[in-house]
Amino acid sequence: MSDLFTWRSDRPNCVVLPYPQAKRIGKARKYALTAYRLEGEPRRLASYRVRMRNELLRMLDEGGVDNDAALAQADDFDRLVNREVDRLRTMDRLGLLLDEREGEAG
């Protein structure tokens, strides 16, 4: 019988499994709306995207996610944000884009 509270060096370290960033649709829509509004200002948009990615990587790192997994998760989240920006662009072109907080977006 083993004692659960006795430290043994032969036990593997724990692995942190991050929440799949590709499922954070609400956060992606928030970021996408800001990114969409900044499309006319490429420098501000690039700065915003870098800050967004660095914040996500920092959060994952502080949570104990290894670097390779964090980068993969950040890439998944970037793809999700890009899809949301494309969706906003299409909705705006069709005249269907409404911002819940301010009425029509744009």
Image (spheres, rainbow, N blue to C red):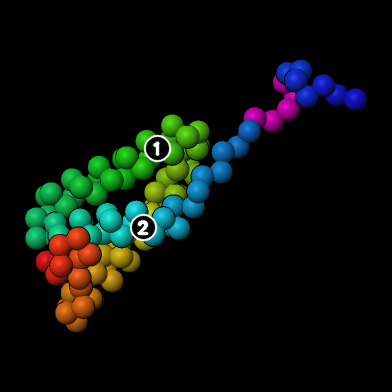
- Viewer-side residue, 44 vs 2: 2
Residue 26, placed above or below residue 71: below
Residue 70 lies, in percent from the top left, at 45, 43
The disc placed on residue 106 is none
Q: Which residue corresponds to mark 1?
A: 59
Percent from the top left, x then y, of residue 67? Answer: 46, 38
Q: Which residue is mark 2?
A: 26
Residue 87 location in percent, x, y? Answer: 28, 71
Q: Quadrant of residue 84?
A: bottom left
Q: Amino acid at mark 1?
A: Met
Q: Can you say which quadrant of the picture contains the C terminus? A: bottom left
Left or right for 99, reference 6: left
Q: Earlier in the sequence, mark 1 or mark 2?
A: 2
Say few, some or many: other residues with alpha carbon within 10 Å of mark 2 (under 14 / 14 to 19 / 20 or more): few
Q: Position of residue 99 (x, y in %)?
A: 20, 65
Which residue corresponds to the image point at 28% horizontal and 56% vertical from the top-left?
30
Work out how far the residue at label 1 is from the one at label 2, CA to CA, in angstroms.
Answer: 17 Å
Identity, as a three-letter code, of the amino acid under mark 2:
Gly
29 with respect to 34 (left or right) = right
Q: Which residues are magenta?
A: 8-13
**Element type where label 2 sits in the image:** helix
In this view, the residue in front, 97 or 42, is: 97
The residue that appears at 43% across and 39% down in the rendered structure is 60
Quarter location, residue 71: top left
| Camera-side residue of 95 and 43 | 95
Residue 100 in sight here = yes
The residue furthest top is: 6
